[in-house]
Image (cartoon, grey):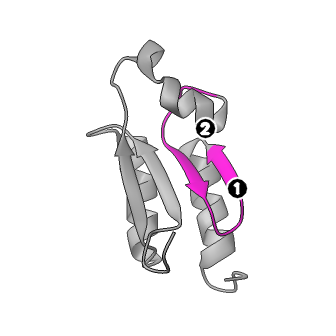
Amino acid sequence: MSESDPQITLYRLQACPFCERVVRVLNDLDLSYQSRFVEPMHSDRNVVKRVSGKRSVPAIVDENTGVTMSESANIVEYLQNTYGEGGAA
């Protein structure tokens, strides 16, 4: 992976309010990320299950820290704690 490749991958659904919440925080923190849109059908989301252990979205993979997580509230808190004011990055 080159330096310019986004280190964060966001697994999301089109028009999902929880996914949009995470997108807003990523944009507010000026983080580059790659969106991977997943299957609308919950039972078809095997790519997300392989990554996070669950089929729910949003889910992120942060190559910078090795963190993989789902649940929008957890992701927002993680992003703000890691990359926001006073964060380690």
Residue at x 43% of width, y 64% of height:
33
Between 63 and 14, the one lying in front of the other is: 63
Which quarter shows the C terminus? bottom right
What residue does disc 1 label? 67
Q: Left or right: where does residue 5 sit relative to residue 67? A: left
Residue 13 placement (x, y as % from top left): 34, 37
Furthest toward the top, the residue is 43
Membership of 46 in magenta stretch: no
**Dot 2 lies on which element?**
helix
What residue is at 37 percent from the left and 52 percent from the top? 35
Disc 2 designates what residue? 51
Q: Position of residue 2 (x, y in %)?
A: 48, 76
Q: Amino acid at mark 1?
A: Val
Q: Residue sitting at 46 percent across and 24 percent down?
A: 45
What are the residue bounds of the magenta stretch? Answer: 54-69
Residue 88 in the image: above or below residue 60 = below
For badge 2, the amino acid type reads: Val
Mark 1–mark 2 contact, CB under 8 Å?
A: no
Tell me if residue 12 comes above or below residue 55 in the rendering.
below
